Amino acid sequence: MNFPELLQALAQHLNLPLKEDSQGSCSLLVEQTLLVQLEMSRDEAHLFFGARLGSLSPGRYREEMLELALRENGRSYPHLGILGYSTGANELAFFDALRLDIFPAEAISYAFQIFVEKALIWHRAIERGTYPEEITMPAQTDNFMVR
């Protein structure tokens, strides 16, 4: 399945108008503040999810958030996504890759909803200068706006 076909299948499951952009990815603006991107690997074996969660200025808050991110990355099931830190941009990022040969579109859409919910929790915490809460349920698809 190529990327436009996969986006079409995901669009049906998520009830969203997903389209490939000129860069070969698909960007969604969630709650007007969080940009989430989807992109297929060149060999069409994986689908990548990614989001920049926000800037972390030097100090105690950044140290504590990075410690929480490391703990989150070390969690066992259910585990979705990897939190990473860009020293150049002072930003926390969130990303994941799903193997397309073992995940049907329905499972990918569910994983994507959980990914977005987790990204929103961390993004909101960074915006407020607080700490992330636990994930309780997948995101509602009506929070999305195609960019």
Image: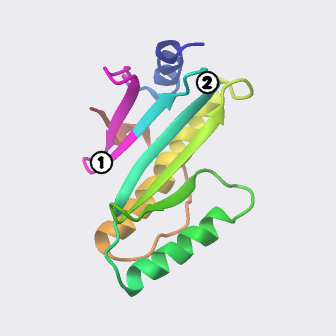
48 left or right of 142? right
Q: Position of residue 38 (x, y in %)?
A: 46, 33
In the image, residue 123 above or below residue 14: below
Amino acid type for the residue under numbered disc 1: Glu
**Which residue is rendered at x = 55% and y = 67% of the image?**
134
Q: Which mark is residue 105?
A: 2
Q: Position of residue 85 (x, y in %)?
A: 46, 63
Amino acid type for the residue under numbered disc 2: Ala
Q: Residues within 10 Å of mark 2 (few under 14, many from 20)?
A: some
Q: Position of residue 116 (x, y in %)?
A: 47, 47
**Which residue is rendered at x = 30% and y = 67% of the image?**
127
In the image, residue 134 above or below residue 81: below
In the image, residue 97 above or below residue 59: above
Towards the viewer: 95 or 11: 95
The residue segment tinted magenta is: 17-36
Towards the viewer: 23 or 115: 23
Of all residues, the one furthest to the bottom in this rendering is 60
Q: Position of residue 84 (x, y in %)?
A: 51, 59
Can you tell which quarter of the image residue 21 is in? top left
**Which residue is rendered at x = 67% and y = 55% of the image?**
79
Circles 1, 2 touching at the beta carbon (< 8 Å):
no
Q: Which mark is residue 31?
A: 1
- Answer with mark 1 or mark 2, whichever residue precedes in sequence: 1
Q: Residues within 10 Å of mark 1 (few under 14, many from 20)?
A: few
Distance between the alpha carbons at the discs numbered 1 and 2 = 24 Å
Quarter containing the C terminus: top left
Quarter containing the N terminus: top right
